Amino acid sequence: MKKRPVILDCDPGHDDAIALMLALSSKELDVRLITVSAGNSTIERTTLNALRIVSFLDKQVEVAAGARKPLRRVVIPDVETHGESGLDGPVLPEPKFSASSRNALDAQADVLKRSESKVTIIPTGPLTNIALLLSVYPELKDKIDRIVLMGGACFGGNWLPNAEFNIMIDPEAADIVFRSGVPVTMCGLDVTLKAQIFPAEFDIFRRMPNRTGPLVAELLDFFHKSTTPPFMAAPGHEEGAHMHDVCAVAWVLAPELFVSRHLNVQIETVSELTLGCTVVDYNNVFKLQPNADVCFDIDRKGFLDLLTSGISSLP
Ligand code: RIB
Ligand code: CA
């Protein structure tokens, strides 16, 4: 079966790291390139973290560093959630290879130009690199099959009451992506907060006989402790670890696990109060052309099975 060519754009980040592992475990995906953004930590640290993960898995994939800051604003690394290194908790060996000599923009453009078929782009951090690609090489839009991103929310937010971190860090970049005309799947907080792994399930990974399972358990241990207080927890219900970024890769592998609606999404880029809000027109009030498949629900057990099967197949 022909493998699906993909480019991953990430800011590892604990959940980015697990998303990378799932993508690299899949026999259905041809990961042509990994590009890195600044968000969970500085570009130096997120790039080093991406290299560490790829090395740890004994994979050979080009890792190219991207923009060190959003298009117009400053980056506020999410030290609270991911720690100083951006991947605190487990001790990962130093990478066996360096970052690409090409920057993300040149590498992405080259992969798209050379690809014999359309490429799926899976961003799991701020969208700066993708906005630059679409702006500098608009003619390459036709080589992009779909942008399947983790970001935004129809209802609520995390870093602001109505804005999610990835979009809020670079709202101008998100605006470019959602206006681009390229098909978009939006895995926002509406679905990612339901894509939880509960502490009792961490041992599924801890007990795996390979080295990657226990690493995932350590990442979950840290991420679960550091994640912002549960805002979906019902009384007496222990909130699990939210696998935000893993949803984007899972959607590419198994879209049938998700429930989504084709809606119009606009990005707030002016108001300080709601900066980065993904204004999802759930009731089609504006009667505008839908521009994204917005995910709202997930088969959590199927998601967990997909992840455990992927992780158990890694070294
Ligand atoms: O809001 C969740 C997003 O912010 C995830 O991509 C996580 O890695 C952080 O970057
Ligand atoms: Ca991320």
Image (tube, grey):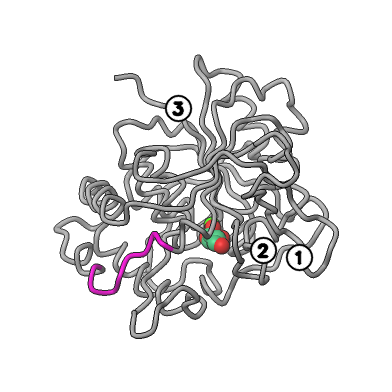
Q: Residue 294, image x and y in percent?
A: 55, 46
Which numbered tag is attached to residue 5? Answer: 3
Q: Which residues are magenta?
A: 194-201
Residue at 23%, 62% (x, y): give it: 205
Q: Which residue reaches farthest bottom?
A: 236
Q: Nearer the viewer, mark 3 or mark 1?
A: 1
Residue pointed to by mark 1: 274
Q: Secondary structure at mark 3?
A: strand
Taking the view exactly as shown, the residue that stands out farthest to the top is: 116
Q: Helix or strand or loop: what does disc 1 sit on?
A: loop
Q: Earlier in the sequence, mark 3 or mark 1?
A: 3
Q: Residue 313 location, x and y as percent? A: 21, 45
User: In front: 13, or 261?
Assistant: 261
Residue 63 can be seen in this image: no
Residue type at tag 2: Ala
* Among numbered discs 3 and 2, the one appearing first in the sequence: 3
Label 1 packing within 10 angstroms: few (<14), some (14-19), many (20+)? some
Image marks 1 and 2: residues in contact by CB distance under 8 Å: yes
Q: From mark 3 to mark 2, how far is it between C-alphas?
A: 31 Å
Q: Amino acid at mark 1?
A: Thr
Which of the numbered marks, if any, corresponds to residue 163? Answer: 2
Q: Is residue 149 above or below residue 227?
A: above
Left or right placement of residue 233 versus residue 265 in this view: left
Place of residue 219 in the rendered image (x, y in percent of width and height, measured from the top left): 37, 67
